[in-house]
Amino acid sequence: MWDKLKDILLKVQKPARYVGGEYNLPDMDKPCQERVCLCFSDKYEVGMSNIGTRILYHMLNDMPDIVCERCYAPDIDMANELRKNNLPLFSLETKRDIKSFDIVGFSVQFELQFTNIVYMLDLMGMPYYAKDRGEEFPPVVAGGPCVVNPMPFAPFFDAILIGEGEKNLKEIVLLHKECKQNKISKKEFLERASKLDGVYVPSLHNPTKRAVLEDLDKAYFPTKILVPNCEIVHDRSTIELFRGCANGCRFCQAGFYYRPIRERKVDTLVKYACELMDNTGYDELSLSSLSTSDYSGLKELVAKIKVEADKRKVKLALPSLRLDSFEAEIYEDMQGASLTFAPEAGTQRLRDVINKNIKESDILSSLTAALKYGVKNVKLYFITGLPTETDEDLQGIVDIVKLVKDLHYKYGKSKLLNIVVSTSVFIPKPLTPFQWEPQISLEEMYRKQDFLKENLRIKNVKYSWHDAKASVIEAVLARGDQSIAKAVVKAYELGCIFDSWSENFDYDKWIKAFEESGVDYNKFLKGFEEDEELPWDIIDNGVRKEYLLKERHLAIEGKTTPNCIGKCNGCGANKFARCFE
């Protein structure tokens, strides 16, 4: 295969995506009894930026008798060359046919990657549906954030891993190795796998509860990671401070899914940071979590890591911060930095509805402090179409931008301040208090965006917005049942590939796919009754449905729930592991 590939690589864009051999590559020639291929259903530069798949890749390769390789979705030019030369999709490390692996795993990160699953299976020469793949094909499993509701893509997979892969991926790989040694059939393997925590087998439709690591401080974390061959989306090293979120924003699926809250110790993180800087040569280190500024030891951690980073001439990067927990002094030595804040809603009333739990005074004091420290760029994120939103709430977004401008004139240390305002469209995601809500119409999405376009014509303010039509398709794919799978296949057959890349997304093809496959997509946009069985109810993701309903009712009343730091609010996730106090 390699001889043909060498010729093909001269004909495609970014051939570095396909050659492998990156710095810090694990030993691919070690004796092994189980060979796994982890597939990421997007391009190399996206997949190589994902910390979750990086952890799992190195974890498997550090296990005895296990070798793990990778495969990313090839760009369209490469796919055309593979078809022209009658070559199957191959692994990056050893250029093996994916069908020759013992287990094939997919990471499903977001809804608009669903057609890329079918795309990659097609290039592998595998039937799309698990029911059509016999013993001659390896088990194909899925994991990642979208497994909160796995039903829309469940028919494509033999098993779906719910929860944290450090636990259930490791267990299912070891189980398959045992079954292979004992010549046990795929069917029997799947029956045994269905007994593991966090393994949902679509053919058995077995209830399962999410797999969770009890102690994140002792969990596997690689510090000798692959360094990519070409520029990637997040081209830096990253340490994960903690998992979970205590804030309970009612629109946020990740905030509920990744509970309970578990922190790594400061000394553990400093050790990881030093090893990453020494092993990779990156000039930037990011501190990552759902709400990084809520890490209990952030000031101490930043101070200790910054000493080590300065020695190595490495820049320290912090992601989006909560306005109520912003520690401006952290930025004292980082003057000129860009800060990202996410107020989410423009008025206090709507922030109370979504349980954002920040006050006008938080916004005022945090932005004032940031500007005093010389911040030159402020990014503000909001969501439009939230439940109960009115035009007064939209005007509130404009008012916050004007407030930032006024504060800059009064307190700003830098002469020029650039403000970027970004809005996304609310999607009522599973496992949130808003999972029963309808999504606003496409026409209403456009009207709200037009309102902001008109009213944010302010000097040095840039406004960007998420594609409304893409938000409609995302909502259907997020909330759908197993009938959606046939529409995903039809969309792929109509040419829908790399839908998350705006230049490739085609709304009309998606609507045609729903119509031709007989799927009433509108029913997944209209919302659900509170006593209705939801497509994802068979999965126990930790947070009790009763708790989500209670939070929905509090939202309607405009009442907030305090964060759960130091006091459990009884969501149910604490049954998996003890939350920090």
Image (cartoon, rainbow, N blue to C red):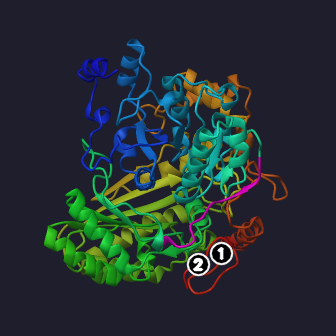
Classify 10 Å Cα crowding around label 2: few (below 14), some (14-19), many (20 and above): many
Residues under numbered marks 2 and 1 in contact, where contact means CB atoms less than 8 Å apart: yes
The residue lying at 64 percent from left, 49 percent from top is: 440
How many marks on residues?
2
- Single out the residue that lies furthest toward the front: 182
* Precedes in sequence: disc 2 or disc 1: 1
On whether residue 211 falls in the magenta region, the answer is yes
In the image, which residues are magenta? 206-216
Circle 1 SS class: helix
In this rendering, is residue 176 above or below 558?
above
What residue does disc 1 label?
A: 574
Give the image location of residue 356, x and y in percent.
55, 72
Give the image location of residue 522, x and y in percent.
71, 39
What residue does disc 2 label?
A: 579
The residue lying at 78 percent from left, 68 percent from top is: 546
Left or right? Give the position of 507 relative to 187: left
Q: Nearer the viewer, residue 463 or 437?
A: 437
Residue 410 seen: no
Q: Tell me the quarter of the picture where residue 274 sits.
A: bottom left
Q: Tell me the quarter of the picture where residue 18 sits.
A: top left
Give the image location of residue 149, x and y in percent.
66, 49
The residue lying at 44 percent from left, 31 percent from top is: 504
On whether residue 388 falls in the magenta region, the answer is no
Which numbered disc covers residue 115?
none
Q: Nearer the viewer, residue 325 or 526?
A: 325
Circle 2 SS class: loop
